[in-house]
Amino acid sequence: MKNYMKGQSPMKFDEFTLILLGAVIFLGITAIALSTPGEFPPSTDPNEVTLTLYPGASADFNFKIAPKISEVNISTTGTISNWIYLSNSKFGLTREGVTVNVNVDVPNNVKTGIYNGTIIVRSKEGKTELKVSINIPETYQFDSQIIDLSNFDVEYLNETKTLVELENYVIKNNHLLDNKLILDNLRIESNQLKTIKEANIKFVVYTKENFGSIIVLQNGIEIFNENVGAGAVNIPLDISNLQQLNNIEITTTSPGLLFWTQNLYDTRNISVNLILEGNTEESIFNFELDKKYLNKLSKVQITYQIQNYDLEDNTSTELKIKLNNQTIHSRNPSLTTFNNIFEYDILEKPIKLLENNIIEFEFNEKAKYEIKDAKLIIFTGII
């Protein structure tokens, strides 16, 4: 038996043993890393959607794809595959998760029943399915009244419109001459009248003689009578007295007993201006209903095509449709066609139809929509 000196280790690893131990640890760590997946199979939230829609109606919904998956492809199958339109069907890498918008457009001639389809989300690590079920209830009886709205514009104005401009004019009054400025036939489009927020006549007094007042008549009514000095003048017009055709008269007072003198204003840069803001009246319609449509469960269908549009920002622009002051639609405007059926307003209150009704289309900001072949269809006697 060997004797060990005090302080001497009873076991000693040689260099080969240390290298072997390090290799084993390295291989273990690598195996763990390789066995841990870098991506997860796709999942959606929600994973099932059920909608109740009538023939010819459409609806939207969103679903979210979980983050940290790549090479995503989305497809549809089933009876309603051709009814479904996806905002995007391919993604490279969803680091933060992706929201997909789905539009469901039900054909006009579909029969009562339940129709099913599937949205399939595939990635490198697998796939998941979002089940979509569309319930088509027993449809309306074809007891309907069609109101033809034809072609019209929906337009929100936010601009300044100049009705007339003159470079200069000398307004003077003496015992021999009353040289007044007459601006007549100033036309305002009828559908713009309600959008007028401000109106004014502006000019610059270059020189003046004596102390006569400037007098302004708007459509025969005096709206201004003051002595003004040299410089810029801004006279507000009476909005309530503006019409489709307008006349403005600018004159100065007579020198009176000072018959050898004259009152004179040498004016420059004369303009009549309107500040327009709001929706025009062209997209407001009145219609009457037969009494048989009143006090019954009724539905309203609105259809039209978009001929042209001018939207500064489609993400913030909203088209609002109001029926008898009930807002039945408020969303980003479609850029192609519109075909929706309404039974409730956006507050989920039943639509109230009257003998005399009004329907309005309007935007929330500057935008223009050219609509053609618009129809309003009233259905009654829902089974």
Image (cartoon, grey):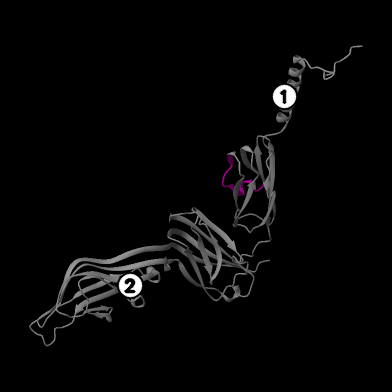
Which quarter of the picture shows residue 370?
bottom left
Identify the residue at the far top of this view: 1
Q: Residue at x 68, y 61 (%)?
A: 138
Task: Find disc 2 in the rendering and name its residue.
Answer: 244
Labelled disc at residue 26: 1
Which quarter of the picture shows residue 250?
bottom left
Q: Residue 277 in the image: x percent, y percent?
A: 40, 66
Q: Residues within 10 Å of mark 1 (few under 14, many from 20)?
A: few
Q: Residue 367 in the image: x percent, y percent?
A: 43, 59
Q: Residues within 10 Å of mark 2 (few under 14, many from 20)?
A: few
Q: Is residue 224 left or right of residue 40?
A: left
Q: Is residue 93 above or below residue 11?
A: below
Q: Is residue 221 above or below residue 106?
A: below
* Numbered disc 1: secondary structure: helix
Q: Nearer the viewer, residue 296 or 251?
A: 251
Q: Is residue 336 left or right of residue 49?
A: left
Q: Residue 352 in the image: x percent, y percent?
A: 59, 72
* Numbered disc 2: secondary structure: loop
Labelled disc at residue 268: none
Q: Residue at x 80, y 17 (%)?
A: 12
Give the CA distance from mark 2 to mark 1.
88 Å
Q: Nearer the viewer, residue 89 or 264?
A: 264
Q: Residue at x 40, y 71 (%)?
A: 194
Q: Amino acid at mark 2?
A: Gln
| Residue stretch rendered in magenta on the structure | 79-91
Residue 3 falls inside the magenta stretch: no
